[in-house]
Image (cartoon, rainbow, N blue to C red):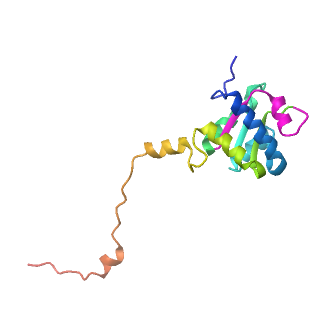
Amino acid sequence: MAKSYIDFEVSKEVQDKTLDALRLARQGGNVRKGVNEVTKSVERGLASLVVIAADVEPEEVVMHIPTLCKQKNIAYVFVPSKLELGKAIGMNVACSSVAVEKTGSADAAVKDVVARITGKSSASGESQKTQEKKESRPQQKKEPKPKKEQQASEPAKAPEN
């Protein structure tokens, strides 16, 4: 049975690249492990990539993370196994979620994973979702407000009779 918190399926290639990026990020960067640390990192806006295991039981433990990531515009991806995720960051135990805060030497690898997830090119400065939001907003014209100084400096005219 599919988990309710999994929004999209990730190809095996992207999963492998994600785990490789995590291996690089743990060596030279800053990686947060565990649901509580990931939640804090996302809420503070420090995470650049969030990785969530797909086999978490009960699923309510990590169910809030994708929603938080969407609100903060942070890329997230799913990997199939907690054990693989734990091994990728150098732990001998399973790990349900990981947040990459500082990429270090894994900068190019993390940007590549984020580009594959969001569907944008790594050279572009905006995600596809951000671009769609901007396009869907109606453009508002700003009219200059009259300055009070100009109105006050004009002499009062007497009514003509």
Residue visible at 11% across and 79% down in the picture: 160
Q: Is residue 102 magenta?
A: no
Residue visible at 68% across and 40% down in the picture: 113
Residue visible at 78% across and 41% down in the picture: 22
Is residue 42 among the parts visible in the rendering?
no
Q: Position of residue 152 (x, y in %)?
A: 32, 79
Front-most of residues 58 and 138: 138
Q: Is residue 85 magenta?
A: yes
Reply above or below: 5 against 2.
Answer: below
Specify the farthest residue to the top: 1
Reply above or below: 41 against 94.
Answer: below
Is residue 146 among the parts visible in the rendering?
yes
Is 82 placed left or right of 137 in the picture?
A: right
Is 1 placed left or right of 71 in the picture?
A: right
Residue visible at 35% across and 78% down in the picture: 149
Front-most of residues 3 and 25: 25
Is 84 placed left or right of 17 in the picture?
A: right
Q: Position of residue 90 (x, y in %)?
A: 88, 39
Front-most of residues 19 and 2: 19
Residue 1 placement: quadrant: top right
In this picture, which residue range is highlighted in magenta?
74-93
Q: Position of residue 23 (x, y in %)?
A: 81, 41
Residue 158 placement: quadrant: bottom left
Reply above or below: 140 against 11.
Answer: below
Q: Quadrant of the C terminus?
A: bottom left
Q: Position of residue 26 (x, y in %)?
A: 82, 45
Is 128 placed left or right of 58 in the picture?
A: left
Count all numbered tags in the image, as a single digit.
0
Specify the farthest residue to the left: 161
